Amino acid sequence: SQVQDMSLVKTAAAKDMAFAFDIDGVLVHGDRLIPEGKRVLEILNGDNELGIKIPHIFLTNGSGKVEEKRCDQLSKILHSPVSTEQFIQSHTPMSALSEYYETVLVVGGENYQCREVAKNYGFKNIVVPNDIVASISTISPLKEFFTAEQRATSTPRDFSKVKIDAILVFSDSRDYATDLQIIMDLLQSENGVLGTYAKDPVSQRIPIYFSQGDMLCPTEHPTPRMSQGTFRIALEAIYKSITGVELERVVYGKPEMATYKYADDVMSSWMETIHNEERLPKNIYMIGDNPASDIVGGNMYGWNTCLVRTGVYQGEGNDDANPANFGVFNNVLDAVQTALRKEL
Ligand code: G3P
Ligand code: MG
């Protein structure tokens, strides 16, 4: 019958669209739910007129926790299951680096949590700044506190015998002074051995990677707070003025293309999981609150972009510098309903 035909067409359309959700400022603020986020996930998980799952992944510049733990936490806040198979946080694609670097300095977050993240990614020797502080007590004269817990979770060793192959900034620094000092020491060292000093600042410099570049992050505070990008530009400025050369570095996360490419792979394998069809849906909608990361990246990657007003962006019309191509919405539910109306 015509009604059945219509429903088949709509079912096919529902499998040919997908959503990529930003998390902070779209679905949650810190640990607080944005109520429309809960409804959106119910709809996409099957509470819709077709009774079908509409594919969606989570693409966040968030960081600092093992994927499984963060997904458990998000499932509780959002009241819907969030699987690690549909989840990408800023440092997730950095797991590929474990093939190239054996010993790494992992910076940011709560040290012991990022150590766990790096371990999960397959890095063999993981050093965190507190391991160095615990071993070389004079290294950071501006450090005021080294708590008993920090000491207990540190592994002191003889760093004159450790060659660090790369620096990975996974999450926000909890101690700019100490982290900047240690990174500067390593960047100026001979191939990553603390206490040495490179004759050539460029050829003997070890590489540095950042998991994301956002300047601002929406939190429970009324106005956005500084994020990992501010730490990076501080380091770049310090490095340039002390050494006279530019710091080469690699940044992951939105809006970097590598992250969107990675998202495509995650999206098609998630399609396999929920619909037994390993392929990329045609119409992908990115829903984000930060024009400078979510929207610019989605636009460049050919996705439909929706900007919401619940996070970093608070403006009236569209963003001037990076306008969302599908429009601006008061919240994530408005955006998703408009996209569903268009496609189904
Ligand atoms: O900028 C820091 C991070 O918390 C942003 O997360 O989900 O908005 O990409 P998200
Ligand atoms: Mg956001």
Image (tube, rainbow, N blue to C red):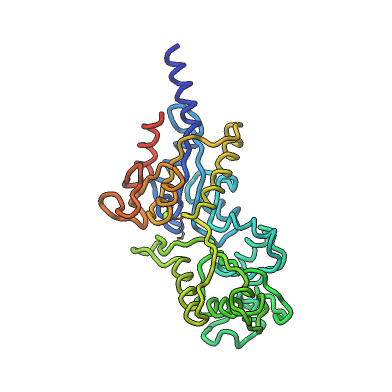
Quadrant where the image shows the C terminus: top left
x and y percentages locating residue 126 in the rendered image: 68, 68
| Residue name at image x 41 percent, y 67 percent | 226
Q: 120 and 103: which one is in front?
A: 103
Name the one closer to the observer, 152 or 283. 283
Residue drawn at x 63%, y 79% as measured from the top left: 189
Residue at the extreme top = 1
Q: On the rendered image, what quadrant is the N terminus found in?
A: top left
To which quarter of the image does residue 149 belong?
A: bottom right
Residue in the foreground of this view, choosing between 168 and 202? 202
Q: Nearer the viewer, residue 210 or 59?
A: 210
Residue 47 location (% of width, % of height): 46, 33
What x and y, as percent, mark residue 190?
Answer: 66, 79
Residue 291, compared with residue 200, is above or below; it is above
Q: Is residue 333 rendered to the left or right of residue 111?
A: left
Q: What is the x, y in percent for residue 272?
A: 60, 35
**Vertical comparison of 38 with 5: above or below:** below
Q: Is residue 149 left or right of residue 31?
A: right
Total tally of numbered discs in the picture: 0
Residue found at the very far left of the displayed protein = 316
